[in-house]
Amino acid sequence: MKMLLNGQWVDRDKKIDVIDPFDNSVIDTVPAGNDKDVELALSSAVQGFQITKRMTVYDRAQILYKAAGLISERLEEFATIIAREGSKTINEARKEASRCVNTITCSAEEAKRILGETIPWDSFPGGEKRKGFYYRFPIGVVLAITPFNDPLNLVAHKLGPAIAAGNSVILKPATVTPLSAIKLVEVLLEAGLPENAIQVITGYGSKIGDPLVSDERVRMISFTGGVEAGKHIASKAGIKKIGMELGSDSPVIVWKDADMQLAVESCVSGSFWAAGQNCIGVQRLLVHKEIYDEFKTKFVELTKTYKIGDKLKEDTMMGPMITENEAKRIEQWVNDAVAGGAKLLTGGKRDGAMYDPTVLENVPADAKVHYEEVFAPTVNLYQVDDLDKAIAQANALPYGLLAGIFTRDLETAFKAAYELDCGGVMINDSTDYRLDSMPFGGVKYSGLGREGLKFSLQEMTEPKVVCFNLPGI
Ligand code: NAP
């Protein structure tokens, strides 16, 4: 596939292979963008903004509605690309593709709700003769940088609201999974998006990242990815708006009055969805000691039923990690934890990029699987017996995206909801539950700002005040 610069699909001699991590086959190639491509993307996006900022809300919304319809018609095609270039099974990929339809549709709906307000100028002496209001105007060129793990829907979470807001966009998708993103852009153009409204530049973030991020023509960076890249980008960005959706180490408390079956099934699915490469994937399960043994037995039993393998087979429940190196990383982290005293309850085996669903207990506090984001199909069980301590334990690490609690008691649920430090608390769900239109984002190292279409639109627009001085009235 090619890059989209200045309205043209362009290729370069230097290419990057896009590899299916299941069998290492080369699915396609994309050009390795260079500094000249960065400049072309930036200058074209500036021109594009002159067009997009004058488009009516109706036109922006119609393009998005049409694009959503086209994705819906081609759902299986999108799902197959997601499954092939990434880690997801075909069933996980279908879910992502249908969520993308919702994300783009909600972006169109939210375009119609970019509202302003009148201002009570006469609320302070001297303002009696003034009338006016504020409205929200598009921010300008948005640089969207996206990760590999939801290669379609997380791109839609940036392109949808950016277009709805009237911005132009430069998209830099993850190098390992650029194809779903490019396909989405093809559909947006087919739906009528003006050509310079969007640029897609492929290539390594470590090479083309700095000149894009630091350029003053970019007015907002919307980044989803890891904390290390996030810190680097923030250090280079200069004075511009930054939205950051970063990692986590999602804690879920399973209290003594939990619905056991519900908790086990949700937490197993939440731990191993997309081979655990999920920013809201369950990493730490804090289980009440009175139900710990029963929960552990059922959790491990269900984990052992997971069928892993070929992503395109209908009955496969979990695919490979994104690369063999990533699987080797988690293998090392688990081995280190076991050497430090953790007990392996199931899993722990690697075959190429495939890493078995893995459950650990007695994990020492100095093990990376405890204090780093694992981003892999491995989960830790901890025994707890006091709610305050469980909440303190959940809050102890430097992330805070989503947290969860399973309980039937309202007071327990409310206490957890108010005291867990994070962007959202799921009650009787694992952390792996997200509605695309809810405010989504984290505290601490999990991010800055919120996505979720209405909220992304707030971030991607700015208020402008209009004040009339009318001495004659
Ligand atoms: P990553 O390595 O941080 O990469 C994310 C994106 O940033 C890629 O497009 C990457 O390009 C680019 N990038 C890397 N270095 C850059 C630089 N110096 N300048 C500009 N761009 C740069 O993350 P990943 O491995 O793809 O994704 C996993 C991480 O994303 C996890 O930490 C996960 O928790 C997080 N995530 C968060 C959310 C959320 O909503 N909070 C959702 C999904 C994932 P290359 O691919 O070319 O390196």
Image (cartoon, helix red, strand yellow):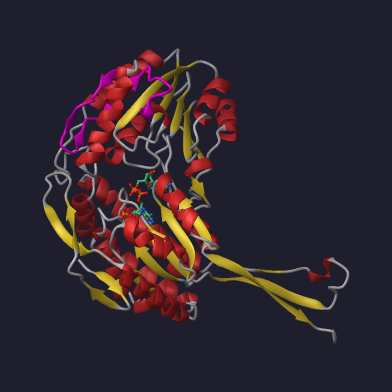
In the rendered image, residue 363 lying in the magenta stretch gets the answer yes
Image: magenta residue range: 343-369
In the rendered image, residue 439 lying in the magenta stretch gets the answer no
**Along the viewing direction, whichever of 339 and 353 lies nearer the viewer:** 339
Above/below status of 195 relative to 202 = below
**Along the viewing direction, whichever of 387 and 217 lies nearer the viewer:** 217
Above/below status of 405 relative to 7 = above
Residue at image x 42%, y 20%? 382
**Along the viewing direction, whichever of 234 and 74 lies nearer the viewer:** 234
In the image, is 328 to the left or to the right of 139?
A: left
Residue at image x 51%, y 50%? 439
In the image, is 198 to the left or to the right of 311?
A: right
Q: Residue furthest right?
A: 125
Q: Quadrant of residue 336?
A: top left
Residue at image x 29%, y 55%? 97
Give how far across and how far down residue 453 sits, in percent: 47, 58
In the image, is 234 to the left or to the right of 414?
A: left
Count of labels shown?
Answer: 0
Q: Residue furthest bottom?
A: 472
Say whether residue 173 is visible.
no
Give how far across and how far down residue 57 sits, in percent: 49, 75
**Along the viewing direction, whichever of 288 and 151 lies nearer the viewer:** 151
- For the C terminus, the image quarter is bottom right
- For the N terminus, the image quarter is bottom left
Q: Quadrant of residue 127?
A: bottom right
Above/below status of 431 relative to 439 = above
Residue at image x 41%, y 60%? 158
Say whether residue 308 is visible.
yes
